[in-house]
């Protein structure tokens, strides 16, 4: 791992939070992600299952976490199974955590090898009345493959068909949505690395550079700061490409006079950040570009103020929609009649602003959390309004990450230039 080690107290606390929600005499099982294959003998970079990481800090494949707070033999309240290592295995496969290291990282005392799972676990399955299994229940998941977790769940349920089964996902969504101080520090580190990347770009972007050259500058800056890389597929979209919301080709040359939309951010220690800035390729916004930019910036600030404890997403989205409608009227993009005759299910503003304003963020960029429940202090959200005008070859979005506090919002990206003039000044000082 490139990140600095994390104190095990984070994972110990997280396990306690989870266990507090278990019914009596229950055992919960969590499985790591697979190393995903590509072709021939190739594979993708490893990405741990976010729930397993949250509860254990173990960042490698073939890991199982068992939580059984009411177990009769008190030593086995928490168990980790990890991939067997030895000096010989280390030579061939690279070092994996040994038992002492596993204990140090996670704070779990009982550590066994992965292949011992069935043998060790037999008595505990006999004792447990309920088994909690985990699953990806993100509302926007789209999974065509069978995950390691699915395979594991199927094999447990086949071997122990008469237990009562429960879902861990609703508990995980609830507890992961409220970030601890240590988690906020990790997200802040991701945001700070993103800031370095963005500042580097302000010195690099000029007419003639290619979108992929910008992507390359960022990955260089991210990795040299201990990030594994982008927190999500980077969007480097100049001119009309900015109106393609999920543009990821990043293969166009940036032209004098264009705005380039940069939705690019680093991960750190598996925690995401999520930034968008829209900057002028030649270093100076035109009058029209600045007009639209400032409308989006006003929206960004007004929406942020609404993120307070007790606010519902229904109310938030409605108020943001109303403010956006006003801005689009001012910009001459909507007419009063458009608004008067609008379809309430698809209001007129959606023509120029068709995506959501905020999502949970944490270990996953679109993190887990319940949009159906009121906002609470400790939640982390993006705020990312945009205005997309394909007929003008112009798309502008501004996105920062905020933690909701009891008194307002903590801007985790407050040091990243956001005012049009500040961006222009920094670009003017480039060579
Ligand atoms: N970059 C993905 C998003 O802003 O949600
Ligand atoms: Mn984004
Ligand atoms: Mn976002």
Image (cartoon, grey):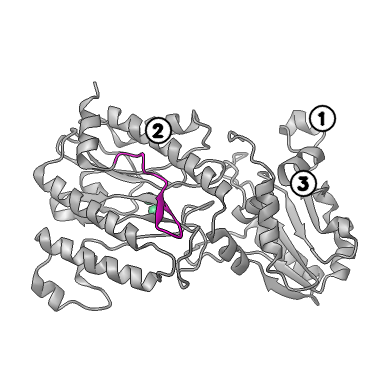
Q: Residue furthest top?
A: 431
Question: Which of the 4 quarters of the picture holds residue 390?
Answer: bottom left
Kindly check if marks 2 and 3 are in contact, taking CB atoms under 8 A apart as contact.
no
Does 83 appear above or below 159?
above
Distance in Å between CA atoms under marks 1 and 2 = 39 Å
Q: On the rendered image, what quadrant is the C terminus found in? A: top left
- What residue appears at the point 62 percent right and 58 percent down from the top-left corner? 147
Question: Which of the 4 quarters of the picture holds residue 7?
Answer: top right
Q: Which residue is mark 3?
A: 82
Please state the horizontal and vertical placement of residue 321, each as a whole percent of the image. 26, 68
Viewed as shown, does residue 117 lie left or right of 199?
A: right
Kindly check if marks 1 and 3 are in contact, taking CB atoms under 8 A apart as contact.
no
- Looking at the rendered structure, the number of numbered marks drawn on it comes to 3
Residue 38 at least partly seen: yes
Give, as a single range, the part of the protein colored magenta.
Answer: 402-417
Q: Which residue is mark 2?
A: 196
Q: Which mark is residue 87?
A: 1
| Label 2 Cα crowd, 10 Å radius (few <14 / some 14-19 / many 20+) | some
């Amino acid at each position: 791992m490139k990140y600095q080690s994390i104190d095990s107290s984070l994972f110990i606390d997280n396990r306690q939070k989870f266990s507090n929600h278990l019914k009596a005499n229950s055992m919960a099982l969590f499985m790591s992600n697979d190393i995903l294959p590509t072709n021939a003998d190739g594979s993708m970079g490893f990405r741990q299952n976010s729930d397993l990481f949250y509860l254990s800090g173990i960042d490698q494949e073939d890991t199982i976490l068992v939580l059984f707070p009411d177990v009769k033999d008190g030593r086995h309240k928490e168990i980790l199974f990890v991939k067997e290592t030895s000096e010989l295995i280390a030579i061939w496969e690279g070092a994996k955590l040994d038992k002492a290291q596993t204990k140090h990282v996670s704070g779990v005392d009982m550590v066994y090898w992965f292949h011992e799972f069935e043998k060790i676990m037999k008595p505990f399955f006999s004792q447990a009345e309920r088994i909690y299994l985990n699953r990806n229940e993100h509302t926007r998941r789209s999974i065509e493959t069978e995950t390691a977790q699915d395979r594991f769940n199927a094999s447990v349920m086949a071997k122990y068909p008469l237990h009562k089964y429960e879902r861990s996902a609703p508990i995980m969504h609830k507890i992961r949505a409220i970030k601890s101080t240590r988690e906020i520090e990790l997200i802040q580190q991701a945001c700070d690395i993103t800031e370095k990347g963005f500042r580097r770009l302000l010195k690099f972007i000029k007419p003639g550079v290619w979108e992929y050259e910008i992507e390359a500058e960022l990955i260089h800056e991210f990795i040299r700061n201990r990030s594994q890389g982008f927190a999500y597929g980077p969007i480097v979209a100049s001119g009309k490409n900015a109106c393609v919301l999920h543009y990821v080709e990043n293969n166009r040359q940036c032209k004098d006079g264009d705005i380039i939309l940069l939705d690019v951010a680093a991960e750190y220690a598996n925690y995401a950040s999520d930034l968008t800035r829209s900057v002028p390729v030649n270093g100076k916004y035109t009058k029209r570009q600045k007009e639209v930019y400032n409308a989006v910036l006003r929206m960004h600030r007004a929406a942020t103020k609404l993120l307070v404890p007790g606010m519902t997403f229904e109310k938030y989205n409605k108020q943001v929609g109303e403010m956006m409608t006003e801005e689009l009227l001012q910009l001459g993009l909507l007419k009063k009649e458009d608004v008067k005759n609008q379809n309430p299910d698809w209001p007129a503003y959606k023509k120029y602003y068709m995506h959501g304003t905020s999502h949970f963020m944490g270990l996953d960029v679109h993190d887990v959390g319940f949009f159906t429940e009121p906002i609470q202090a400790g939640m982390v959200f993006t705020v990312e309004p945009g205005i997309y005008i394909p007929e003008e070859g112009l798309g502008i979005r501004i996105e920062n990450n905020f933690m909701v506090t009891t008194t307002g919002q903590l801007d985790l990206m407050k040091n990243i230039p956001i005012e049009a003039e500040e961006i222009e000044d920094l670009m003017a000082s480039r060579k």
